[in-house]
Image (cartoon, helix red, strand yellow):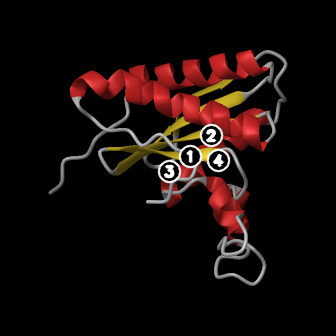
Amino acid sequence: MKTALKLELTEARAMIDAALRKAAELNVPETCCISDEGGFPLIIERMDGARVTGPQIAWNKAFTAAGHKRSTHLFNTPPNGPALPGNEAFGIQWSFEGKFAVFVGGFPIVVDGEVVGGVGLSGGNGEQDTVCGVAALQALADLLAPTGRQVLVAADIKK
């Protein structure tokens, strides 16, 4: 048996708050989803003025990042992104009834080397979604620092 870390609502709330604060600084109406390790939402929050499609897209990105343990944009990063035409996972985006996201804005949440969830952003361009996602990861790192837990704070994550 293995003891597993579980992301809790307080931690998910801190991450959402940080991501949406960063989005407000950038003046970009974002939607953010924080999921558990199985990709199921703990919190989805859409800023005023954000697109109505944002919640589903943010969830898809969090689902993919948590479930496949990598940042979603890495699937399409040339030349070896596995979802690029001719590569081994081309077409993977049609998996899970189209829920598999292979574009920028999804990041696994890695604590002490284990994927405990995902964060997904929708509403900005790739750079803006990334900055907001990294802000969410940094917020978790700051929150857990007193406990000695290590959070991976990076844009390009592959576990």
Name the disc covering residue 66, or none: 3
Point out residue 26 in the picture as x, y percentages from the top left corner: 76, 21
Q: Which residue is mark 1?
A: 107
Point out residue 46 in the picture as x, y percentages from the top left corner: 71, 23
At mark 4, the secondary structure is helix
Marked residue nearer the N-terminal end (2 or 4): 4
Kindly check if marks 2 and 4 are in contact, taking CB atoms under 8 A apart as contact: yes
Kindly check if marks 1 and 2 are in contact, taking CB atoms under 8 A apart as contact: yes
Mark 1 or 2, closer to the camera: 1
Marked residue nearer the N-terminal end (3 or 4): 4
Marked residue nearer the N-terminal end (1 or 3): 3
Placement of the C terminus among the 4 image quadrants: bottom left
Q: Which residue is mark 4?
A: 61
At mark 3, the secondary structure is helix
Marked residue nearer the N-terminal end (1 or 2): 1
Name the disc covering residue 120, or none: 2
Query: Does residue 143 sit above or below 67 in this rendering?
Result: above
